[in-house]
Amino acid sequence: MAAGRALEEDEPERAYEHTKVARRFAARIGVVREAVGIAAYRSGHFAEALSDLRAARRMTGSDAYLPVMADCERGLGRPERALDLVRSQEAERLDRVGKIELAIVESGARRDLGQNDAAVITLQRLPELRDTRPHPWSARLAFAYADALAEAGHEEPAVEWFGRAMAFDEDGETDAAERYAQLTGTVIEDLEEDEDFDEIEVDDAATLDAQLEDEADLDEDGPDFGDVLPEEGPAAEEETPAEAAGEAVLGDEAGKAGTEADEAGKAGAEETEADDEAAGAADADAAKTAAKVEAGVGPAFIEPDFGDVLGDSNEDEDEDKDEDKKK
């Protein structure tokens, strides 16, 4: 997975290092050897790539990477061996995509041997070359054919086919745009747009600097509020009849508001007095109730008994009356 991410990020050397670590732990697994071979091929290590791809071919029995193996032979400077792989029996078992890729490698091997016309004819035999619909191989096939035409000295048709390859190559897989620009002396449209964008940015920056300088000048001069501020002196103190009338109306409204406030104050005072009286009456009732409670609760008054004393005095008075009668 790390090797796959590195290849997607266009870092084949880092991908190759990851796959070598995987090979140390799983050298007898065909998929691992295939991954090592592809990473080595993408990073330019053609001998290592050829060795690992041969091992993967023995383990899996698949000939899918035969075009890559033939191209590794070209990379090692052995175009004859590349042609031997093209003419091998294994090449006959490839699917259509594999045969197109192998034909592209064969055309390159012919050019390596100086057989430029044979390189052009090798690709002309493919019916897919005349297919105007986009396919996964369309950009690579058109570019290889244009490159073969340019190498054979057919510059005008080469320019046309580099243009076709550029139209097919939306992902930038080939160098068709650069080769087209070299042969025609034109500038690629995308580059022109980038240059125009840079010029616009420069113009905008200059305009922004000019605006900032103007604002700085305004800050130094200071704002002028002479027309807005009121004039001082007798002219400013004079009032118009409308202003005097407005002030009179405001005075009357203020007087009415004051009168209403006084009446509200008196009403509040009367309510306060009534509340005080009610509170006093409530306190008196409470005192009476407390007195009654105390009288009921306290000890009853017992009248003293003077019966014995009163009886003796009456008897003495009777005796005195009897003595007077006797006399």
Image: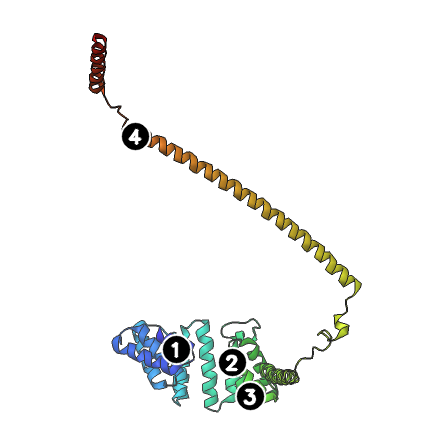
Whether residue 53 appears in this view of the structure is: no
Residue 306: x and y, percent? 23, 21
Asked whether 141 or 190 is in front, the reply is: 190
The residue that label 1 is drawn on is: 6
Q: Residue furthest top?
A: 326
* Separation of marks 1 and 3 at Cα, in angstroms: 34 Å
Answer few, some or many: residues within 10 Å of disc 1's Cα (few below 14, many 20 plus, some between 14 and 19): some
The residue that label 3 is drawn on is: 150
Vertical relation: 245 (above or below) 317:
below
* Separation of marks 3 and 4 at Cα, in angstroms: 136 Å
Mark 1: amino acid = Ala
Image-based side of 209 in relation to 250, left or right: left
The residue that label 4 is drawn on is: 297
Tell me if label 1 and label 3 are in contact, CB under 8 Å. no
Q: Secondary structure at mark 4?
A: helix
Mark 3: amino acid = Ala
